[in-house]
Amino acid sequence: MSPRSFGVVGAAAVPHAPQMLSVPPSEDAAQVGRVRASMLAIGERLRALEPDLVIVIGNDHGDDFILRSVPAFMLHCGPFAEGRDGHSGNWAVDGEAGYELLEGLQGESFDPAFTLDAPLGTFFTIPIAFMGWTMQTPVLPLFVNAYVPPQPSGLRCHALGQALARVIERKRRRAVLIASGGLSHFPGTPAYRDPGPDLETDRRIFDACSRGNLLSMLAHDDPSLDRTGNIELRSWQILAGAIGESTPDVALFEPNWHHTYAVFGWTALCKSAAASPLHYRRIPSAVVPLAQALHLLRTSAVACAHYLRDPEGFAQRFQLGDEERALLLAMDEAAMRDRCGVHALLTSGAVRRLESVRRTLSGGQ
């Protein structure tokens, strides 16, 4: 089992264009096939993580959030939901998990609405089915108001994702999150065909997310999301809050005349973090004495002269373990930084200051 035993263990951002379901003559069948194959492969890898909760985040398309009540966010707490638009029938819902997360989010200063009988559009059912789950798989739908102003801001969506991740971990659930939403398109408007998708903006969003820079999505305010046809990015912003700055292990970009298909999968969240350590990391408490010695060398020419004259005597001033003592005497910059975890500014600064003092003592030679 992954080191991340509880919490959000995997995630995906996937499209839900109805053309993927019907594949009309206007579509490139090979392109749709590539998108579907990518989604299915991600779904298989997410199931291998053995989640006990599958949350699908979908942007309501005016089916429910438009006249009577328009909440920013809504959880489904019923036992099943009727499918729509080519996906009719009853789709199983993990309603008890919905109540569980609803109460947890209230403790996080969020008050999402809840429903017991709202139907599910294809913006929910396409990701469920195309990623390899079935109508009998209990999933938890999380609705987002993307289309009816005033919509929740990107910052609010991101904050909801952060709160959701905390609640999931606190409840000791293993969850995968599926953010259902496309890149640019303009359903119901003349811009759907002319000018069509904003490929320039879509490519910038895709490239940044491919590098793991998910916070970049917050640079788009409400007018920007509307102008570029990326109002459904809100589901991705929630996902970004839940998983943080994480590089996807699957990424697919497929421009189309009406819609930019983009697919991301995060199926090894813990492994990706371990494989790409930060350049500037926290100093482990066990090596603080070594860090103190290096800080003194970095900031004091007198200390450097002491070290150069009597390294053993200098090292005795600090409560060093055998390994740290040996590395300090050898002034092994790489090992102190990479093996011990001392901050790079301390290791490099101490070495550079020692070199400077040595040159001064030797008369500049």
Image (tube, helix red, strand yellow):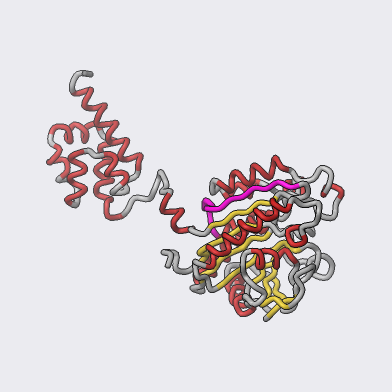
Decide if residue 51 is on the left or right side of residue 198: left
Viewer-proximal residue, 80 or 170? 80
Which quadrant, please, contains the N terminus? Answer: bottom left
Q: Position of residue 153 (x, y in %)?
A: 69, 55
Q: Position of residue 93 (x, y in %)?
A: 66, 76
Viewer-proximal residue, 252 or 177? 252
Region of the chain picked out in magenta, as a range:
243-256
| Residue 196 picture quarter | top right
Whether the magenta-drawn stretch holds residue 246 is answered as: yes
Viewer-proximal residue, 221 or 62? 62
* Position of 62 relative to 291 (above/below): below
Q: Residue at x 75, y 77 (%)?
A: 89
Any part of residue 160 in sight = no
Q: Position of residue 86 (x, y in %)?
A: 78, 68
Q: Position of residue 27 (x, y in %)?
A: 77, 52
Which quadrant, please, contains the C terminus? Answer: top left
